[in-house]
């Protein structure tokens, strides 16, 4: 086996080991408030509009991505009828193709 093939096999072995690693549970602080207050702040104060959402039936919650299409700022929110939690925020949002989300 030449050096190039040996390197490829080594990289593949390491990649497969990483892919099958045990999952970890991490805890982080999140900010939560009543749903109406959070969604109103996103649209009125931060000028973000919903761009994507998905429902999680196991937690009976919706996850929504809001984006300010002018600045590129984004917020990921998980919410139900009563409580909304901000689980992530950032800047410079774009789609897979480099266009604003």
Image (cartoon, grey):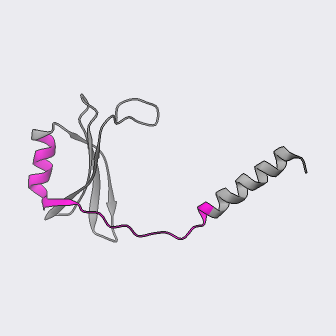
Asked if residue 43 lies left or right of residue 7, the reply is left
Queried whether the magenta region covers residue 89, the answer comes back as: no
- The region drawn magenta spans 18-44
Residue 14 in picture, x, y percent from top left: 67, 58
- In which image quadrant can residue 51 be found? top left
Along the line of sight, which residue is nearer the eye, 37 or 2?
2
Give percent across and percent down for residue 11: 71, 52
User: In the image, what residue occupies the spot 10% across and 47% down?
Assistant: 40
Q: Residue reaching furthest right?
A: 1
Question: Image quadrant for the C terminus?
Answer: top left
Indicate yes or no whether the magenta region holds residue 32: yes
Place residue 79 in its image quadrant.
bottom left
Outermost residue toward the front in this view:
3
The answer to whether 63 appears left or right of 44 in the picture is right
x and y, in percent, of residue 33 in the image: 12, 60
Q: Residue at x 72, y 59 (%)?
A: 13
Residue 12 x, y percent position in the rendering: 71, 54
Say above or below: 18 vs 73. Answer: below
- At x 45%, y 69%, the residue is 24
Residue drawn where x is 57% and y is 67% of the image? 21
Tag count: 0
Image: 72 above or below 63: above
């Amino acid at each position: 086996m030449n050096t190039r093939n040996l390197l490829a096999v080594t990289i593949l072995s390491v990649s497969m080991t990483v892919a099958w690693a045990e999952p970890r549970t991490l805890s982080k602080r999140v900010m939560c408030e009543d749903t109406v207050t959070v969604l109103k702040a996103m649209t009125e104060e931060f000028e973000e509009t919903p761009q994507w959402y998905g429902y999680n039936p196991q937690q009976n919650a919706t996850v929504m991505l809001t984006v300010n299409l002018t600045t590129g700022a984004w917020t990921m929110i998980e919410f139900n009828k009563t409580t909304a939690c901000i689980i992530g925020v950032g800047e410079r949002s774009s789609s897979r193709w480099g266009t604003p989300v």
